[in-house]
Structure formats: C-alpha cells, structure tokens
Amino acid sequence: MLKSNGERLWASLMAMAEIGATARGGSCRLALSEEDKAGRELFAHWCREAGMALSVDPIGNLFARRPGTDPEAAPVMIGSHLDTQPEGGRFDGVYGVLAGLEVVRCLNDLQIQTRKPLEVAVWTNEEGARFTPAMFGSAVFTGSMQLEDALAVRDTEGVSVAEALQRTGFAGKRPLGGAVDAYFEAHIEQGPILEDNAKSIGVVSGGQAIRWLDVRVEGMAAHAGTTPMPLRKDALYAAAPMIQAIEQLACDFAPQGLTTVGELSISKSSRNTIPGLVQFTVDLRHHLDSAIDEMEQQVGKRLQAIAAQRGLKVSISRHWVSPATPFDADCVAAVQAAVDGLGYAQQSIVSGAGHDAILLARYCPTAMVFIPCVGGLSHNEAEDVLPEDVRRGADVLLNAVLARAGRVE
C-alpha cells in the first residue's frame, strides 16, 4: 500500500490557514470573498506546480486535472471546499481539497500513471455562511439547482453571487456537469464518535437526512408599559415554548434525531415594545427519511398548538431538503480495502453533516473518508486534528483513488 507525505500535507494545511487567519487560531474565508479568492489562488498555484490543468465553471467551481492514459475515460474526482464559517477552523473542507492535491503529488513523486484522469475539485459556497443555501456549487454542477437561481442569491450586504464571481474572477466558462467516473471526499468527522471509539478512520456509508425550516410567529406589537399581560400577543414569549418543543422533539426521536434552532430575529425590536413578529430557523436531522418526515409533521403540530393557545399565528415553510443518501457500494468497498490494507483502526459511520459528497452521490458513484477531530469540535476556531490522523486519511484516500483510477504498469 502507498503512503502519503504527511509533513508536506500538514505544511500545506498550515499555509492555507494563514489566509483569513483569525485571532484565536481559526480561519475566515467566506465564499467568494477576497480571502476565499486568495485561498483559491494559492491552491491553483500549487496545482500548476504539480503539472495540473485548471478550469472553472460558471458557478465558480474550480477543477485541477491530472491526465490519464485513456483520453476517453471519465475522471475520478476528489474534492471538498476552501470556504469557511465566519469563525471557522483550519481543517473543515480544506483538508479534503489538500488531501486530493497530496494524492496527485504522491503519484507524481512515484511516477505512477493512472488510466483514468484525476480531478481535484474546489466547490463553491459549501458552508452557506455568506450565501444560502449551502453547497450550491455542487448543487449547480449536479443539476439539482439552476445556475440562474444560484447567481441571483444575495448576501446580507446585497451582493449577488454573480457580482461576487465577477469581482473575484471566478466566473468561469467550463461547461457545467459532465461525466464523472467516481467521487471521493476526505473530511474531518466534525463530531466525537471516532475519537471516543479510538478510531483513526471512518468509512462513511452515507449521509443522514437534513431538513431546514423557516418559522414565522406573528403576534401584535404594543407598548410594554401600558398593555396588561393577559391582553398581550407576544411573539417572542410564544417562540420560547415553541423552541422548547423542538428541543423535546429530539428527545422523542433519540438517539438519531437531532434538532437545532440556529437563528432567531425580532422584527423592528425595541426595548419597550412587545415583539410582534419573531422568525427563527429549525434544523432537523435523522438517518431515516421516514423519521425526518414525522419530525417535520410534529414540528407543525406542536407549534400550531402553542400558537392557538396564545392567540397568535405561526407559519412554517421548508427552506432546504437533503434526503438520506447511501454511498456507492463499490466506492465504499475501495475505501474499506485501503483501510484494511493499511491496517488502520476504523469503523463504519454515517455522516451527520451535509457535504458536497451528498449531492455528488446522486450524480455519480461516491464515497467519503473521515478522520477524527479533537473533542469532536468543528465550526469553531479551536477546531483541531492530529497530524498522524491527517496522514492516515490521506493514505486511505490515495489508495482508494488509485484503485478506482487504475494504475498503469
């Protein structure tokens, strides 16, 4: 089995982390920002040094290609993202991109040719922190979102995706989509399971279902000092038991059911005004589509009951849906064979987070490789991984990709 150059990969990760570095040791490279542009340009520089050809599609996805000996073969693709949360870590996404580059560097070092070409992909806006929804770079690539819809999305400052692509120079002309033989993505787990079980590698069997809802609670704004409590229609006081009901829902669907209220806003808020309109988001997750369907139904029933009790109006709409997605058996088997051959401690795992690989899995054969992160912490400046786990994950990726791409003797 082949081994990657762990020191080189770690050095590349640390160099990328300097772009958009935060005061507490994390990274901030919001999608299509100047920092994201600089990160992409550094990656492109390294790819050119590795002899790869670069192309960019109209949604800004960046591809670096190493040719194969068969000019008719579809590429084996490796990828992830370089954009981060506003106070993100140094490894979420970027590890998968630079592990893909390390695969190519290792093959170059060993002068190994593959029958199928390899492509390392950087997907646009995986995080969804600046533009929503998340993962629309891979969504547009795979055809699950229309290009025009993605280009029209605006951030909180009113800047559209189309404008940001023009500003950063990543409005490319490579045709969207195209044949892909298989897709592999390496990623930090972003949870505690591998670390708690003392495993170096997670062989990912698929991704859990995710459903985002938007909730709007309408009461009546009124004076805080002159309106008796029994006569109030306080939207925020109504939202509080609604949020508690959503937390209880996770207990009812434990251990696989997860619920989160991540954003809450009071419209035209004032210290001495009773809130008349409150909006908040709901994130539902479960391994099974049938269970997440029931969870969504329960959100509607429980929130409507609270609203009726308080004489308010609540409306709930879907913002984004990602069904449970199994990965390709042959690609997962290639990852498993690589782990077995290397002798690393491993376990099968379901991805709890959304990834570009989830969208690619509906487009082409796909698999993922997880490595542990310290304390299971991610989307945080303190996010950390161990260098030996970084190397082991790249070793697995290298051998799985090579097996799929076909070594030319």
Image (tube, grey):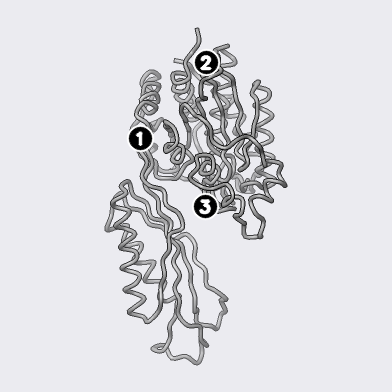
Taking 28 as reference, is 319 left or right? left
Location of mark 3 (residue): 133
Give the mark nearest the N terminus, 1 or 2: 2
Label 1 secondary element: strand
Q: Of circles 1 and 2, which is in front? A: 2
Q: Is residue 94 left or right of residue 54?
A: left
Residue matched to label 1: 205
Instruction: Determine if residue 204 is in view.
Output: yes
**Left or right: where does residue 139 sit relative to residue 294?**
right
Instruction: Kindly identify the residue that appears in the image at 60 percent across and 38 percent down.
Output: 61
- Residue 207 percent coordinates (x, y): 38, 41
- Look at mark 2 in the image and give the residue it sits on: 114
Residue contact at pointers 1 and 2, CB within 8 angstroms: no
Q: Secondary structure at mark 2?
A: strand
**Please, what is the three-letter code of the amino acid marked with disc 2?**
Thr
Kindly report the distance in space between the C-alpha atoms of the residues bearing marks 1 and 2. 26 Å
The answer to the question of whether label 2 and label 3 lie on touching residues, with beta carbons closer than 8 A, is no
Q: In the image, residue 400 lies at what x, y percent? A: 44, 22
In primary-sequence order, the first of circles 3 and 1 is 3
Q: Is residue 93 left or right of residue 23?
A: left
Sequence-wise, the earlier of marks 2 and 3 is 2
- Residue in front for this viewpoint, 148 or 321: 148
Q: Which mark is residue 306?
A: none
Q: In the displayed structure, would residue 82 be above or below residue 70?
A: below
**Picture residue at 45% right of the left edge, 54% below the top:** 320
The image shows residue 331 at horizontal and vertical percentages of 39, 27
